[in-house]
Image: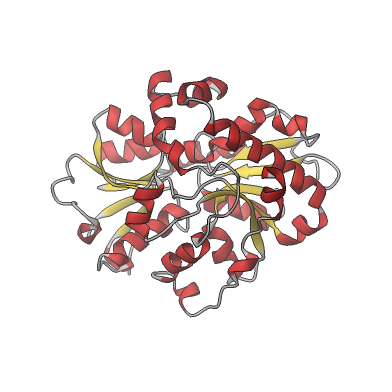
Amino acid sequence: MRRHLTISAAALAATLALGTLTACGSDSSTSGSGGKVKIMVGGLDKVIYLPAMLTQKLGYFKDEGVEVELLTEPAGVQATTSLVSGDVQGVVGFYDHTLDLQVKGKQVESVVQFSHASGEVEVVSNKAAATITSPKDFKGKKLGVTGLGSSTDFLTKYLAVNDGVQTEQFTPVAVGAGQTFISALQQGSIDGGMTTDPTVAQILDKKLGKVLIDMRTPEGSKAALGGPYPSSSLYMNTDWVNSNKETVQKLANAFVKTLKWMSTHSPEEIAAKMPADYAQGGKDLYARAIKSTLPMFTTDGVMPADGPETVERVLKAFNPNLQNATVDLSKTFTTEFAEKAAG
């Protein structure tokens, strides 16, 4: 039986404490109906989820007349739990959770698709770099993921299985992102792992590891996963979407406006709009991290053609819950709001 390792209790507590941090000081008890909309982000400071805070900073939510409270969790799987429990009305996280939830009887859909590539990077420590040259070498290794059941966990399992390594032959280790990931790599708690910018940029800058698989561009994502891989998105419970279409349209308008803004501004200009503490490695390094990840973003918020099929194929390669299940992909996303916003 495979053992799941975790970071130390102290480190985990510190990471989870970040989940209580809000991006604006408003009352989190307010309901999404007729009040503010609460959106949980699977890591507000991750570049892959940058449109969430950037939209707030650009004032586009306010321009649309919708009050948005942004909250953060260290891993997307925890953000999803908040949505299912009704604590928030939306999640900025990976689209793949909509498929996973559907087979569990929960109807959730992406309403704005931020990306057409995964944005993830598999890195290996300098010590393990000689023995891990491809996913076929994952056997017997300890590999960091943000959380068990997270999208980084999903993708790591796919890369392994696709290269002949079964999921029980390696050990996923829940290490979060940012400093907890970096510490685990430094201390040898993991041999490598999957993470995103700005963590990747800091690892390379500190010369703590090397890039094994880069999925920050559509080309890199397609090479690793076999097609376009829609990842970061705004997804919501379908029932809530259908009951609050006016509000959802306002959110889509704001996010699509941000995606367009991002496509016409430099990484330095984008970095300047973000909170100063997001640039933990310094402003220049943060701007480079944004530059590396920018290719993953869409400009219109619309689900890329064939993207859902790629995600389904990836998940079915290793996930027993999906392997024998029929997924109605048409119910995992909608382009109604993004197309209207982009039009």
Q: In the current view of this chain or complex, which residue is farthest to the right?
A: 34
Residue 290 x, y percent position in the rendering:
44, 31
Q: Residue at horizontal 33%, vertical 70%? A: 1
Residue 227 picture quarter: bottom left
The scheme the figure's colours follow is secondary structure
Residue 52 x, y percent position in the rendering:
61, 37
Nearer to us in this view, 26 or 212: 212
Nearer to us in this view, 153 or 225: 225
Q: Residue at horizontal 13%, vertical 47%? A: 130
Q: Work out whether 250 lies above or below 284.
A: below
Residue 117 x, y percent position in the rendering:
45, 49
Nearer to us in this view, 18 or 117: 117
Apparent side of residue 56 relative to residue 212 in the rendered image (left or right): right
Residue 266 x, y percent position in the rendering:
48, 25
Q: Work out whether 327 lies above or below 340.
A: below
Nearer to us in this view, 203 or 175: 203
**Residue 4 visible within the image:** no
Q: In the current view of this chain or complex, which residue is farthest to the front?
A: 343
